[in-house]
Amino acid sequence: MVRAVKQDSELPLFSPPSRKFITISELNDLIKATLETRLDALWVQGEISNFRVPPSGHFYFTLKDEQSQISAVMFRRQGTRLRFVPENGMAVLCYGRVSLYSVRGDLQLYVEDLEPQGQGALSVAFEQLKTKLAAEGLFAAERKRALPFLPRSIGIVTSDRGAALHDMLRILRDRFADRRVVLRPVKVQGDGAGREIAAGIADLNQAGTVDVIIVGRGGGSLEDLWAFNEEIVARAICASRIPVVSAVGHEIDFTIADFVADQRAPTPTAAAEMVVPRRLDLLDQIQTLELQLKRCMDVKFANAREIFTSWVKRLADPGRRLRENQQRVDELSVDLLRRLQDRLRACKEQLNQQGGRLHALSPLAVLERGYSIAHKLPDEHIVKDAAALDAGDLLRITFAAGKALCRVEGKE
């Protein structure tokens, strides 16, 4: 028998399960853990944008393609290993892991390594540094100096174990065995090589015992020669007070040091040939110049001899010319004396005439005609008007012969 059960309309058909909650931090941590365990490290291709470097030294940028983008970060420790500086618009390959930045819930690519796409990192670094130093004027031709013609002492900054050193020493010994060579041994590749090369250049400058410096090494790959592409080496060459010859690798190899140096040699051997001429060549040049000088002197003497001969012929009898000149001097002397006497007589007559005129105008001549001059004392003023006198004034009267003191009794 089935008993119908009355359903209570107030009771739910199903009992709801108990609800479970997680926090935002727990959710982000869960997503982060899932990404890191499910997704391995991978290479990602894209273009850099919004690149920035805060004081912390970390690299922050956006990696994008034509349709999507993702935030990326490369921490300072990994960034210092890069040979180049990332730039906006640069196509790159990034190696790293995708994870979540839990604080903000941002999905990010944490980059461990970075390579330029289609061009090696060293090539990019080379072009970046080349552009930078060129803009600063380190490659300018006007700052390049000429090498000394025959240096007494040559400084060499290179490895003391390489074949390049032996080649240079052989060339220097064959050309001028008495030239002094100062070697500053350094590492020429590997970590710290750039700093050692720069220090070697600075040491030779500080010592001041060499006239020219050769900096270089034998050939190798771009990685092997990279120490000579470092900025510290370029600036050391620029700061050198002594002319520097860059001799790195083979003729086809170019480094930043080549552009900064005062001279670039295609090989270390060529550098040794460049700084010291061959003794035999100099002796040949001296002999050639000696012969040219002798020929020039012979020609000069021959020309002088011809000129002397022609002048001798033109002179004929120099004694006759001298006698003629003596006679001419006598005639001129007599004429000069006559002219001088005539001039003196004319001046004497003119002086007498002017003297007579001056005497006629002299006050003394007036006094001789019976006139006198009255001076009022004590100021010695000449009295021209009786109105200027008062009774009792003292006067000195000058006559043609003698003077007299008078006192005014009255005036009319």
Image (cartoon, rainbow, N blue to C red):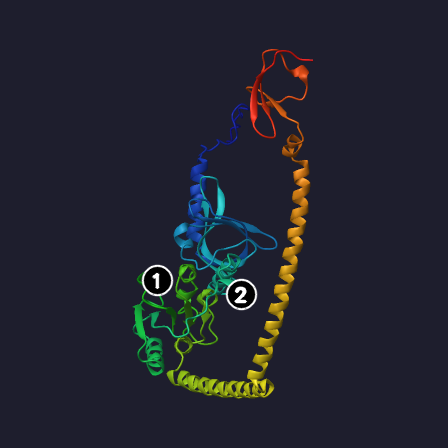
Earlier residue among tags 1 and 2: 2
The image quadrant that residue 79 belongs to is: bottom left
- Residue 331 in the image: x percent, y percent? 62, 72
Q: Quadrant of the C terminus?
A: top right
Kind of residue sitting beneath label 2: Gly
Residue at which label 1 appears: 205
226 and 359: which one is in front?
359
Distance from the alpha carbon under mark 1 to that under mark 2: 41 Å
Q: Judging from the image, what secondary structure is the residue with disc 1 in?
A: helix
Q: Toward the viewer: 365 or 338?
A: 365
Q: Nearer the viewer, residue 202 or 9?
A: 202
| Residue receiving disc 2 | 118
Left or right relative to 363: residue 252? left
User: What residue is at 42 percent from the left and 84 percent from the top?
Assistant: 286
- Where does the image place residue 87, in percent across and percent down from the top left? 52, 54
Residue 61, compared with residue 26, is above or below; it is below
Tell me what residue is drawn at x 63 percent, y 56 percent: 344
Residue type indicated by callout 1? Asn
Q: Nearer the viewer, mark 1 or mark 2?
A: 1
Q: Is residue 147 visible?
A: yes
Q: Are marks 1 and 2 in contact (CB under 8 Å)?
A: no
Residue 72 at what x, y percent from top left?
A: 49, 50
Where on the picture, by quarter, is residue 364?
A: top right
